[in-house]
Image (tube, rainbow, N blue to C red):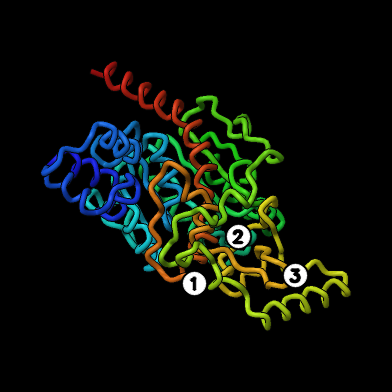
């Protein structure tokens, strides 16, 4: 195998993708592959730049597992901090397809439903990351449970919820740290009782040092998207997510930075030969319906309606239901033209999966599935930011553990 071929594979690029990234035609790339022509040093360096921080060939600065993985937003964030993913769980077949298209399958297969996986089958790891779904926690009175001869306390409060699966895995493996992500309203759900149970389990039962924060992604991407992030460390190391400096949301990028441009190379699926996005323009019938719907609710004093944005604006939160009509984020077009939806490629950029200097994120599913996947995903640069701040504390915990091992002989 040539050095070029080895680097191309580590960068997870197909021959056509390598040609696009390097500015050569495919015939030339095949010559580099075979060794018929030796690739110039600048070409090899560019390939090295495209290799993920941890591409599975080394041990990584730390190991982590990716639960409720979706399409891998949390994984991208922690790989950027030097982590090596050693286990993945995602039940949705379409999300698995996208995940496999973007991450190597030679290190570990994607496990399915986490509720059916024994914690003992999961490999040891330094960090657990999970964007877990929020389910209601039923907290009934202990006396009633006693009267019915049913279990109560922590086990009762979390059984039947997906958070229980996080709890049992942490309890068994005792990772050095974890990062959990959920919607902003997790904090206030059920009058705060849901969040209370979660924090009680993490702090009192599992005995982790925990901090949490609601973070708006507007400082990184042109989207108002608030999410709750919970960080825990097994030992008191001084980390507090509230002490992390965040970029000013007032100075964040605008939508023009993620929209298809006229000078952009056409995308065979999302734009035509001239870079136009006509296929995503609303029909006049749908546009009329949305305007009438918004006017009806305006007169009733409600805030329901479409969101219309231009290149200098910041969008609303992208949701999983975007595939239905795209009404929460509609892009203005020329005079007399109905607006259009974002393309899935633009959604990838809006969520930070696609960025300058990084190989394009692969989208092997239909537009409908892609909208659902990006709407349910994390904003990648937010996770990268948190992971890089966690890194020195993770490494310090590993060094402390190693010193203890040496002292024990």
* Residue farthest toward the top in the current orientation of the protein: 407
Question: Residue 67 or 377: which is nearer the viewer?
Answer: 377
Q: Earlier in the sequence, mark 1 or mark 2?
A: 2
Q: Which residue sits at x=58%, y=31%?
A: 240
- Splitting the image into 4 quarters, where does residue 394 fall? top left
The Cα atoms of the two marked residues, 1 and 2, are separated by: 14 Å
Disc number placed over residue 318 in the picture, else none: 2
Indicate which disc, 3 or 2, sits on the residue closer to the N terminus.
Answer: 3
Left or right of 322 on screen, residue 293? right
Local crowd size for mark 3, using a 10 Å CA cut-off: few (<14), some (14–19), many (≥20): some
Residue identifier under label 1:
368
Residue shown at 27%/37% (left/top)? 43
Q: Nearer the viewer, residue 196 or 327?
A: 327
Residue drawn at x 25%, y 52% as measured from the top left: 108
Instruction: Decide if residue 156 is in sight here.
Output: no
Crowd around label 1: few <14 · some 14–19 · many ≥20 (10 Å)? some
Residue of label 3: 305
Helix, strand, or loop for circle 1? helix
């Amino acid at each position: 195998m040539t050095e070029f071929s080895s680097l191309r594979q580590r960068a997870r690029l197909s021959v056509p993708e390598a040609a696009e990234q390097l500015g050569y035609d495919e015939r030339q790339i095949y010559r580099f592959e075979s060794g018929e022509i030796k690739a110039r040093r600048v070409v090899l360096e560019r390939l090295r730049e495209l290799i993920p921080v941890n591409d599975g060939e080394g041990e990584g600065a730390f190991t982590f597992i990716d639960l409720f993985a979706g399409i891998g937003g949390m994984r991208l964030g922690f790989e950027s901090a030097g982590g090596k993913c050693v286990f993945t769980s995602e039940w949705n077949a379409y999300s698995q397809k996208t995940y496999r298209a973007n991450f190597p399958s030679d290190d570990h297969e994607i496990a399915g439903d986490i509720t059916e996986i024994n914690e003992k089958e999961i490999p040891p790891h330094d960090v657990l990351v999970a964007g877990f779904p929020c389910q209601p926690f039923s907290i009934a009175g202990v006396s009633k449970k006693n009267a019915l001869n049913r279990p109560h306390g922590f086990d009762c409060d979390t059984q039947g919820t997906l958070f229980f699966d996080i709890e049992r895995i942490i309890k068994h493996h005792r990772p050095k740290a974890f990062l959990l992500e959920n919607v902003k309203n997790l904090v206030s759900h059920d009058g705060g009782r849901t969040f209370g149970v979660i924090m009680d389990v993490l702090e009192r039962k599992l005995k982790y040092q925990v901090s949490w924060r609601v973070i708006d992604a507007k400082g990184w991407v042109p989207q108002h998207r608030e999410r709750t992030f919970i960080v825990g460390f097994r030992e008191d190391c001084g980390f507090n997510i509230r002490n992390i400096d965040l970029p000013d949301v007032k100075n964040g990028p605008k939508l023009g930075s993620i929209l298809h441009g006229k000078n952009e190379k056409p995308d065979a699926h999302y734009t035509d030969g001239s870079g136009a996005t006509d296929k995503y323009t609303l029909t006049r019938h749908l546009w009329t319906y949305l305007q009438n719907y918004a006017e009806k609710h305006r007169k009733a004093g409600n805030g329901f309606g479409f969101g219309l944005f231009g290149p200098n604006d910041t969008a609303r939160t992208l949701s999983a239901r975007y595939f239905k009509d795209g009404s929460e984020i509609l892009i203005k077009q020329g005079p007399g033209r109905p607006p259009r939806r974002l393309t899935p490629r633009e959604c990838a950029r809006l969520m930070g999966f696609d960025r300058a200097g990084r190989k394009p994120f692969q989208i092997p599913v239909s537009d409908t599935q892609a909208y659902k996947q990006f709407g349910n995903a994390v904003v990648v640069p937010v996770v990268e930011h948190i992971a890089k701040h966690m890194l020195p504390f993770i490494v310090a915990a590993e060094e402390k553990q190693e010193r203890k091992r040496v002292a024990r002989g």
